């Protein structure tokens, strides 16, 4: 029953990440249509971050239905991917504007930190589940 609830939450996050990727692609197309022929790869490929960072792993986990992450893991994971995506879009805007700024690197550092924190928390949850299963099996004998 708990897995079913987590699977439904994961499906909602999957749909949200697909919508985010579509929004990024549409935003980049509209923004660059008004940029007078100037483009940025950060802006063009910003949609890839939520697509590969969330949609692909989430769709695999929905079909596997094993060791589905909890809501806190999904929140950290999504926050990291959102931070990386926003950082990519801002870097693209800055490049299209024709300037540079080193402060956009903070988005990459914070996004990777949040994303990695989500992975670590997920791994810790998996170990906790496995140890509780082993404990319950040893008590049953």
Image (tube, rainbow, N blue to C red):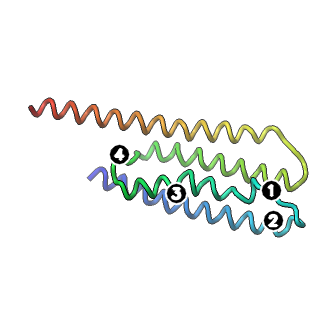
Toward the viewer: 6 or 48? 48
- On the image, numbered disc 1 is attached to which residue? 40
Q: Earlier in the sequence, mark 2 or mark 1?
A: 2
Q: Position of residue 75 (x, y in %)?
A: 50, 46
How would you rate the neighbour count of disc 3 (Cα within 10 Å): few for under 14, some for 14-19, many for 20 or more? many
How would you rate the neighbour count of disc 4 (Cα within 10 Å): few for under 14, some for 14-19, many for 20 or more? some
Up the image or down, 24 lies above or below 122; here it is below
Badge 3 element: helix
Q: Quadrant of residue 36?
A: bottom right
Label 3 – label 2 distance at C-alpha: 25 Å
Badge 4 element: loop
Image quadrant occupied by the C terminus: top left
Q: Which mark is residue 55?
A: 3
Q: Earlier in the sequence, mark 3 or mark 2?
A: 2
Q: Which mark is residue 86?
A: none
- On the image, numbered disc 4 is attached to which residue? 67
Label 4 – label 3 distance at C-alpha: 17 Å
Apparent side of residue 23 relative to residue 6 in the rendered image (left or right)? right
Q: Earlier in the sequence, mark 3 or mark 1?
A: 1
Label 4 – label 2 distance at C-alpha: 41 Å
Up the image or down, 141 lies above or below 101; here it is above
Q: Are marks 2 and 1 in contact (CB under 8 Å)?
A: yes
Badge 2 element: helix
Q: Earlier in the sequence, mark 4 or mark 2?
A: 2
Badge 1 element: loop
Q: Are marks 4 and 1 in contact (CB under 8 Å)?
A: no
Q: Earlier in the sequence, mark 4 or mark 3?
A: 3
Q: Earlier in the sequence, mark 4 or mark 1?
A: 1
């Amino acid at each position: 029953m708990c897995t079913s609830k987590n699977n439904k939450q994961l499906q909602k996050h999957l749909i949200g990440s697909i919508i985010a990727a579509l929004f990024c692609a549409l935003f980049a197309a509209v923004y660059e249509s008004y940029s007078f022929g100037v483009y940025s790869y950060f802006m063009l490929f910003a949609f890839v971050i939520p697509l590969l960072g969330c949609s692909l792993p989430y769709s695999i986990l929905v079909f596997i239905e094993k060791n589905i992450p909890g809501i806190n893991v999904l929140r950290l994971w999504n926050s990291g991917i959102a931070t990386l995506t926003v950082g990519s879009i801002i870097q693209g805007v800055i490049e299209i504007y024709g300037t540079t700024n080193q402060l956009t690197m903070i988005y990459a550092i914070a996004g990777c930190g949040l994303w990695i924190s989500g992975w670590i928390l997920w791994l810790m949850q998996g170990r906790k589940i496995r140890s509780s299963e082993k404990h319950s099996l040893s008590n049953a004998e």
